[in-house]
Image (cartoon, rainbow, N blue to C red):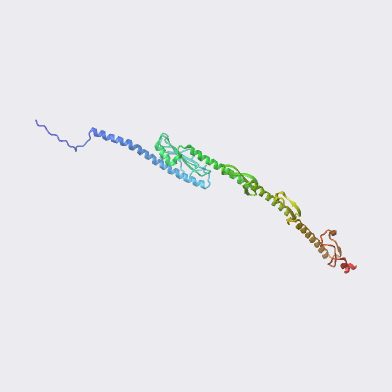
């Protein structure tokens, strides 16, 4: 009996059971490594898209703040609600507005997604990015860091932010009250913001809209204004005489017809000159009226230079002898 030699061909198709097991093992290992990375990459891309949208909203809100709009009650111009972001796996938190705008993951069971967004101070215009990732998910922590840095899960950053807002609000209220008093024309001591103590305790004095930082300056200016008002009243009333006023210091004023002439001598001179003018005017009126005879103004109560005169045919004579030589005196 002849044995038949059988040739084994390595070109025959098919795999052995061992080969199949090895291939399946390798594929299992690869899928275990690559699939999570693949899905993680998808989530990161969606997160980056959501970040870009929030950055755009933050930019629009900051522009509104710079235009003095009330960001507490308005939304970004390009805001489209949940319809725009639902395919990214997010939705907006209740009452989104420029002052506080946050998104939440639609799937609460996915720990790699988290709440994040921004605050804008309505008083300061400061921007604070913030996020609340799971502290047990490294992917979430990494994504949050790319958005908010050290602010992730950091309550103290919100406290600092709110503290600055409160401080700025108090400062604005303080300044507004001070300026309101100034615009209303109120005079006296008021308070403005003290940058050292960060309180509304700095004394400021207002006199007719002018601001003074010390009580001495205020008292001095207030006295000056009172003095000027007193002098103005004297002028308006055409006052003549000697007078003093405490707000004007220890000075004594000598007024003639409402004007301070500087001394008693000057005041008396102006008074005499005025009486002379009155006397001379009275004599001139008598002369023009064809009066004849002696004319003694105010029974002689006039200054020297306006003594008794005699008038004849509109001619004035200084002595009775000269007057008697005229036709008026001879008669």
Closest to the observer: 113 or 240?
A: 240
Q: Is residue 2 above or below residue 172?
A: above
One can see residue 145 in this view = yes
One can see residue 186 in this view = no
Report the quarter where the C terminus lies.
Answer: bottom right
Residue at the left extreme of this rendering? 1
Residue at the right extreme of this rendering? 331
- Left or right: 218 as drawn, with respect to 22: right
- Left or right: 152 as drawn, with respect to 206: left
- Name the residue located 53 percent from the left edge and 40 percent from the top edge: 163
Residue at the top extreme of this rendering? 1
- Left or right: 305 as drawn, with respect to 164: right
Closest to the observer: 262 or 315?
A: 262
* Residue 218 place in picture, x, y as percent: 65, 47
- Name the residue located 41 percent from the left edge and 42 percent from the top edge: 48
- Name the residue located 33 percent from the left edge and 36 percent from the top edge: 33
* Residue 122 place in picture, x, y as percent: 52, 43
Closest to the observer: 201 or 91?
A: 201
Q: Is residue 48 above or below residue 21?
A: below
* Residue 323 place in picture, x, y as percent: 87, 67
């Amino acid at each position: 009996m002849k044995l038949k030699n059988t040739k084994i061909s390595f070109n025959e198709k098919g795999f052995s059971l061992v080969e199949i097991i090895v291939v399946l093992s390798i594929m299992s290992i690869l899928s275990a490594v690559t699939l999570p990375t693949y899905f993680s990459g998808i989530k990161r891309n969606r997160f980056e898209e959501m970040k870009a949208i929030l950055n755009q909203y933050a930019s629009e809100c900051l522009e509104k703040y710079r235009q003095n709009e009330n960001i507490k009650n308005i939304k970004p111009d390009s805001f489209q609600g949940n319809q725009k972001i639902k395919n990214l796996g997010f939705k907006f938190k209740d009452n989104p507005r420029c002052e506080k705008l946050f998104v939440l993951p639609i799937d609460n069971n996915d720990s790699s997604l988290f709440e994040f967004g921004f605050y804008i101070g309505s008083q300061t215009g400061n921007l604070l990015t913030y996020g609340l990732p799971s502290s047990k998910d490294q992917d979430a922590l990494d994504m949050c860091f790319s958005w908010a840095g050290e602010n992730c899960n950091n309550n103290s950053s919100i406290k600092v932010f709110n503290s600055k807002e409160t401080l700025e609000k108090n400062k604005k209220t303080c300044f507004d009250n001070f300026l309101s008093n100034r615009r209303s024309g109120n005079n006296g001591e008021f308070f403005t913001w003290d940058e050292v103590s960060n309180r509304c305790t700095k004394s400021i004095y207002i006199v007719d809209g002018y601001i003074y930082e010390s009580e001495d300056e205020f008292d001095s200016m207030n006295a000056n204004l009172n003095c000027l008002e007193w002098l103005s009243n004297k002028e308006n009333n055409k006052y003549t005489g000697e007078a003093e006023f405490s707000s004007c210091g220890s000075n004594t004023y000598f007024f003639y017809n409402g004007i301070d002439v500087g001394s008693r001598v000057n005041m008396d001179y102006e008074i005499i000159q005025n009486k002379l003018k009155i006397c001379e005017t009275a004599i001139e009126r008598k002369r023009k009226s064809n009066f004849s005879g002696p004319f003694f103004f105010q029974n002689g109560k006039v200054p020297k230079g306006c003594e008794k005169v005699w008038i004849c045919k509109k001619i004035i004579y200084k002595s009775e002898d000269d007057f008697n030589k005229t036709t008026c005196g001879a008669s």
